[in-house]
Amino acid sequence: MQTPYYAVIFTSTRTEADENYGETAELMVKMAAEQPGFLGVESARDEIGITVSYWKDLESIKNWKKVIEHKTAQQKGRNTWYENYTVRIALVEREYSFDKNSL
């Protein structure tokens, strides 16, 4: 990705409730990918979950937050799926990586 761009960092602790969590999470990634300004997503879950989505600009993030299906999933998260969560929005000014397979 070409810098600068924004990262939305979502960390969470789940409840025991499942109630279509996986299906909804997959749908949200699919829908986010269709939004203007979406650049990608990475996710991991163990005791805590971390999902980082990448966006071109703050306006794209604001527009995604307004999507009705996303708002519905957020409400279900607060009511059912999450003990707690935190959302952080960060400007990525520089990035670098290592890939052993590309040596």
Image: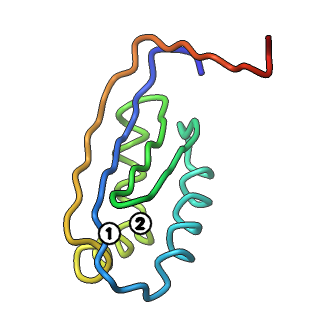
- Between 47 and 56, the residue placed more toward the observer is 47
Q: How many labels does the image show?
A: 2
Q: Position of residue 80 (x, y in %)?
A: 28, 83
Could you say whether the residue bearing mark 1 is in a helix, strand or loop? helix
Above or below, 43 relative to 72: above
Residue 67 higher or lower than 100, as above or below: below
Kindly report the distance in space between the C-alpha atoms of the residues bearing marks 2 and 1.
Answer: 6 Å
Residue 70 has which mark? Answer: 2
Three-letter amino acid code at the position of disc 2: His
Which labelled disc corresponds to residue 49?
A: none
| Residue projecting furthest to the right | 102
Q: Decide: marks 2, 1 in contact (CB < 8 A)? A: yes
Q: Residue at x 29, y 36 (%)?
A: 89
Q: Name the residue under label 1.
A: 74
Q: In which quarter of the image is the N terminus?
A: top right
Pick whichever, 50 or 75, lies toward us: 50
Instruction: Give the amino acid type for the residue marked by disc 1 in the picture.
Output: Gln
For image coordinates 62% across by 60% down, the residue present is 30
**Mark 1 neighbour density, 10 Å: few (under 14) some (14–19) many (20 or more):** some
